[in-house]
């Protein structure tokens, strides 16, 4: 069973087969699969707990509705892992609060209808055969809270959301790895390749390091002399307290015209807006939130889900909680996974704007690349794809980039 602890001099491991830097859901899922592959795995996390930075800020949703082949190839098996989580991690009845109420991408713009139809055709061609194109009337027949203005949508029932904290800790507990809290990686030691990680508690000798440091992945990359092309962008999230007018059987509902979304959350709701004008920032642990953000989101949501207008009118500050984290964009809006050839032993698993939903299969892929079960050339998300010129530009909905 995995061990999560704050190390002392006595319990600090001095040697490991592999060190993962970063204890968000991506790093922890990676450590899970590496340890399951039989490698002596140590994860270092600078903060007080696992899953406390970007992972904690997320909307906790997952979907297979992607149009990039490489994203589908991670999203589909990841959802299967979520669906069978207790069995995968080997902890009977382990509960990650899985809710498969679907993802509904909708529009009131008649000019977008063809784009939605094309997206569904693309999903089907990539093996996501259960996504549906819905007309406006079909949307309202299933979800009466939707405005008469809606002309079309895409929908997939098996998409949904879960509890990130429980999922991350499930991967940790189900592993054979050590998870060192309050332990910051400060340098990566190199000879002909990776030979160790220097931390605030001492040096761990290792030949393999995985950079899963989320928004700090480029900072960690620099420690190994590697430039990691990611751009962190702040994204805010709003939780609205319980309200009888919020339909609890609704799907994750996205307005494709204005990029606002909402879903039910414990008798209330979780709301967000992927502001396309939010600038690229520096990696940060403490991000400011905007006082006016909830009001802006509510106004946007009310356009296609009019019941929000009624709720907004009576909302008090105490019913609204706002937080922020960072999406990490890469040049093609898809993650960076796998070895960096110029530094033998240095691997990336970063560059996510949808890292929760891709983490199970992405972690498995890193383990397969480390053990040789996967050939790096069979991995379309290899970090060298840009200089090789084998890039498929992302065009999935709700990336936040146009
Ligand atoms: C508002 C919002 C909504 C989102 N909604 C969704 C969603 O619905 N679905 C989805 O899939 N994704 C969503 N995302 C994106 C998702 O949250 C991230 O892609 C995912 O959490 C990334 O996980 P991670 O493990 O890579 O990063 P993190 O969770 O940030 O973990 C990285 C860890 O590395 C640690 N670290 C950094 N540097 C060091 C160091 N030097 N030494 C030791 N530790 C270090 C950090 O402390 C941190 O804990 C959302 C993001 C935001 C902000």
Image (spheres, rainbow, N blue to C red):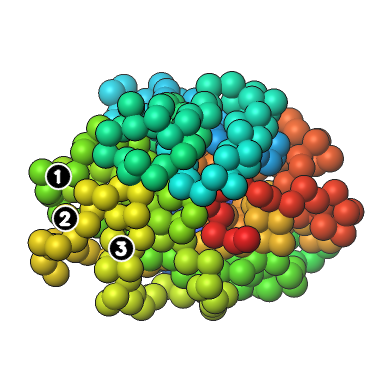
Q: Which residue is mark 1?
A: 245
Earlier along the polypeptide chain: callout 1 or callout 3? 1
Where is mark 3, residue-wise? 299
In the image, the residue with mark 2 has its CB under 8 Å from the nearest atom of ligand 1: no
- CB under 8 Å between callouts 1 and 2? yes
Q: Position of residue 134 (x, y in %)?
A: 48, 29
Outermost residue toward the right in this view: 388
Helix, strand or loop for disc 1: loop
Relative to 24, 329 lies left or right: right
Q: Secondary structure beneath disc 3?
A: helix
CB under 8 Å between callouts 1 and 3?
A: no
Residue 298 in sight here? yes
SS under mark 2: helix
Q: Tell me how many marks there are.
A: 3
- Please report whichever mark, 1 or 2, sits nearer to the chain's N-terminal start: 1
Q: CA distance from mark 2 to mark 3?
A: 11 Å
Please give the name of the residue rendered at 21% of the width and 37% of the height, measured from the top-left corner.
Answer: 248
Q: Residue at x 66, y 72 (%)?
A: 223
Q: Nearer the viewer, residue 5 or 360?
A: 360
Q: Quadrant of residue 115?
A: top right
Residue 266 percent coordinates (x, y): 19, 43
Q: Left or right of 263: which side holds 27?
A: right
Q: Say whether residue 42 is left or right of residue 50.
A: right
Q: Who is closer to the viewer here, 338 or 402? A: 402
Nearer-the-camera pick, 162 or 5: 162
Mark linked to residue 376: none
Work out whether residue 7 can be spotted.
no
Q: Which residue is mark 2?
A: 311
């Amino acid at each position: 069973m995995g061990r999560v602890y704050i190390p002392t001099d006595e319990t600090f491991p001095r040697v490991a087969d592999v060190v993962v830097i970063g204890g968000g859901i991506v790093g922890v899922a990676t450590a899970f699969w590496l340890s399951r592959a039989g490698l002596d795995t140590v994860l270092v996390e600078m903060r007080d707990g696992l899953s406390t930075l970007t992972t904690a800020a997320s909307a906790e949703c997952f979907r297979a509705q992607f149009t990039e082949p490489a994203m589908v190839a991670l999203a589909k098996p990841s959802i299967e892992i979520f669906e069978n989580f207790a069995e995968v991690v080997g902890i009977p009845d382990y509960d990650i609060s899985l809710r498969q109420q679907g993802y509904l991408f909708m529009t009131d713009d008649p000019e977008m209808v063809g784009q939605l139809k094309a997206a569904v055709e693309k999903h089907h061609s990539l093996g996501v055969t259960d996504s549906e194109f819905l007309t406006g009337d079909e949307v309202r027949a299933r979800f009466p809270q939707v405005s008469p203005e809606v002309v079309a949508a895409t929908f997939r029932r098996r998409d949904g959301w879960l509890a990130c904290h429980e999922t991350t800790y499930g991967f940790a507990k189900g592993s054979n790895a050590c998870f060192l809290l309050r332990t910051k990686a400060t340098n990566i030691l190199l000879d002909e390749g990776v030979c160790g990680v220097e931390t605030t508690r001492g040096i761990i000798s290792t030949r393999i390091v995985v950079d899963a440091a989320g928004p700090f992945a480029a900072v960690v990359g620099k420690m190994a002399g590697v430039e990691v092309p990611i751009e962190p962008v702040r994204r805010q999230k709003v939780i609205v307290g319980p309200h009888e007018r919020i339909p609890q059987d609704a799907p994750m509902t996205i307005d494709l015209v204005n990029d606002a979304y909402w879903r039910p959350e414990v008798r209330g709701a979780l709301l967000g807006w992927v502001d396309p004008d939010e600038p690229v920032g520096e990696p940060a642990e403490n991000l400011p939130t905007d006082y006016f953000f909830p009001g802006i989101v509510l106004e946007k949501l009310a356009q296609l889900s009019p019941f929000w207008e009624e709720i907004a009118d009576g909302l008090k500050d105490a019913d609204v909680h706002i937080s922020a984290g960072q999406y990490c964009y890469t040049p093609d809006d898809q993650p960076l996974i796998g070895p960096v050839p110029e530094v033998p032993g240095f691997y990336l698993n970063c560059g996510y704007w949808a890292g929760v939903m891709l983490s199970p299969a992405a972690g498995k892929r890193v383990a397969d690349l480390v053990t040789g079960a996967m050939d790096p050339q069979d991995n379309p998300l290899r970090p060298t794809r840009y200089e090789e010129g084998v890039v498929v530009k992302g065009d999935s909905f709700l990336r936040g980039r146009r």
